[in-house]
Image (cartoon, rainbow, N blue to C red):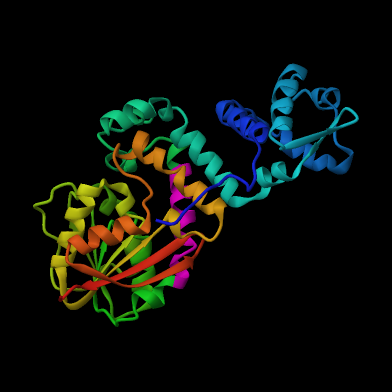
């Protein structure tokens, strides 16, 4: 693993102490900024431009009390979301990001609507490797069993989060998937069938085998029908946690996208072993995932690293965003050899291409 730090070079003790306080009060600041965003305070400041608006001016609109404005805007000020000049608040650069930057807004909604309440149980979840925070959303063993009935707004925020990180990669990844001219492709962890539809539309000669839980396949099938590609798709309901369930055999290519991070390392080992056994001679296995150690910018690594606690408290209790070396090690144990690695796909994806190790 490479050496890594997120601290600025030469950071002094006083500055580090300030950073520690930001962590201590992080949940407080998050909720204040969330209120200011969702209740329209930040937009009101954006509309005012450089002139800004005073607390009395904002309160006179009747939309917020002066008390609420003082509490929230002072917290926003401490976070650099707003600035204060001569008694008037103005939107600062970070505030503009909250209002207009898509990934910031998606991450905000995901943390608030999906994770926030459940993260209170993160410690217990880490100790017992069970998603105890999930009870904030529903009564399921893992989030994946409850995906089809996830309540709003958690459902919309989860899919917006998932699709943003995957959709940016799909358009440019299809030539990579078809580089070896596969005809039988297995999509393990097919989710809503979005990738399968894209691949089937891109190459009319391909047949895709979707493997996932029955609840997920029930969501994927209507999408396949609407896209007019259902006749070239086969659905296989498989519980990934059941290591005795073999995958469909004789596949030219096995595809996994943002999938293995849903499982613990021991389960990943069984999935890769079954996937390797399903490959036809000369077949390949492709893993497209968000690997925090292969990011060009710290902002991407930061977002990915701090998604791992969601997997612990809300999703499964024992999975995370992995490093690339974890996948390579587990694939090698399954009899696979890393052929190529391609980074910089979409927002933050890497593509690992494996072949059967004949050594």
Percent x, y of residue 238: 17, 53
Is residue 115 in the magenta section? Answer: no
Residue occupying the point 8% across, 52% down = 244
Direction from residue 294 to residue 71 in the image, left or right? right
Instruction: Give the overall secondary structure of the magenta segment.
Output: helix
User: In the current view of this chain or complex, which residue is farthest to the top?
Assistant: 67
- In the rendered view, would you say 193 is above or below 21? below
Percent x, y of residue 18: 65, 31
Residue occupying the point 40% across, 39% down = 310
**Toward the viewer: 291 or 223?**
291
- In the rendered view, would you say 303 is above or below 76? below
What quarter of the picture does the N terminus occupy?
A: bottom left
- In the rendered view, would you say 357 is above or below 259? below
Percent x, y of residue 321: 38, 49
Percent x, y of residue 292: 44, 53
Direction from residue 325 to residue 159 in the image, left or right? right
User: In this rendering, does residue 232 appear at all?
Assistant: no
**Toward the viewer: 337 or 309?**
337
Query: Can you tell which quarter of the image residue 118 is in?
Result: top left
**Toward the viewer: 265 or 108?**
265
**Toward the viewer: 296 or 185?**
296
Residue occupying the point 52% across, 47% down = 302
For the record, the magenta segment spans: 156-172
């Amino acid at each position: 693993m490479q050496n890594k730090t997120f601290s600025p070079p030469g950071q002094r003790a006083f500055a580090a102490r300030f950073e520690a306080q930001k962590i201590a009060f992080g949940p407080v600041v998050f909720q204040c900024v969330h209120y200011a965003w969702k209740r329209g305070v930040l937009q009101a400041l954006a509309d005012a431009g450089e002139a800004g608006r005073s607390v009395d001016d904002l309160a006179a609109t009747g939309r917020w009390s002066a008390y609420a404005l003082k509490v929230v805007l002072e917290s926003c000020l401490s976070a650099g979301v707003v600035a204060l000049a001569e008694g008037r608040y103005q939107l600062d650069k970070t505030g503009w990001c909250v209002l207009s930057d898509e990934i910031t807004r998606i991450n905000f909604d995901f943390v608030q609507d999906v994770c926030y309440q459940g993260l209170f149980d993160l410690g217990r979840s880490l100790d017992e490797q069970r998603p105890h925070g999930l009870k904030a959303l529903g009564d399921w063993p893992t989030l994946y069993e409850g995906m089809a009935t996830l309540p709003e707004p958690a459902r919309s925020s989860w899919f917006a989060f998932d699709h943003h990180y995957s959709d940016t990669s799909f358009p440019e990844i299809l030539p990579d998937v078809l580089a070896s001219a596969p005809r039988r492709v297995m999509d393990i962890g097919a989710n809503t069938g979005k990738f399968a539809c894209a691949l089937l539309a891109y190459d009319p000669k391909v047949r895709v085998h979707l493997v996932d839980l029955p609840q997920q396949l029930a969501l994927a099938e209507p999408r396949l029908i609407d896209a007019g590609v259902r006749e070239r798709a086969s659905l296989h309901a498989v519980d990934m946690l059941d290591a005795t369930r073999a995958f469909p055999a004789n596949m030219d290519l096995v595809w996994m996208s943002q999938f293995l991070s849903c499982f613990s390392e021991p389960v990943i080992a069984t999935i890769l072993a079954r996937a390797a056994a399903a490959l036809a001679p000369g077949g390949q296995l492709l893993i497209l995932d968000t690997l925090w150690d292969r990011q060009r910018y710290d902002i991407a690594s930061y977002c990915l690293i701090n998604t791992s606690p969601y997997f612990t408290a809300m999703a499964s209790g024992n999975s995370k965003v992995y490093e690339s070396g974890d996948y390579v090690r587990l694939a090698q144990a399954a009899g696979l050899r890393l052929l190529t690695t391609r980074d910089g796909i979409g927002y933050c994806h890497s593509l690992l291409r494996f072949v059967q190790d004949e050594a």
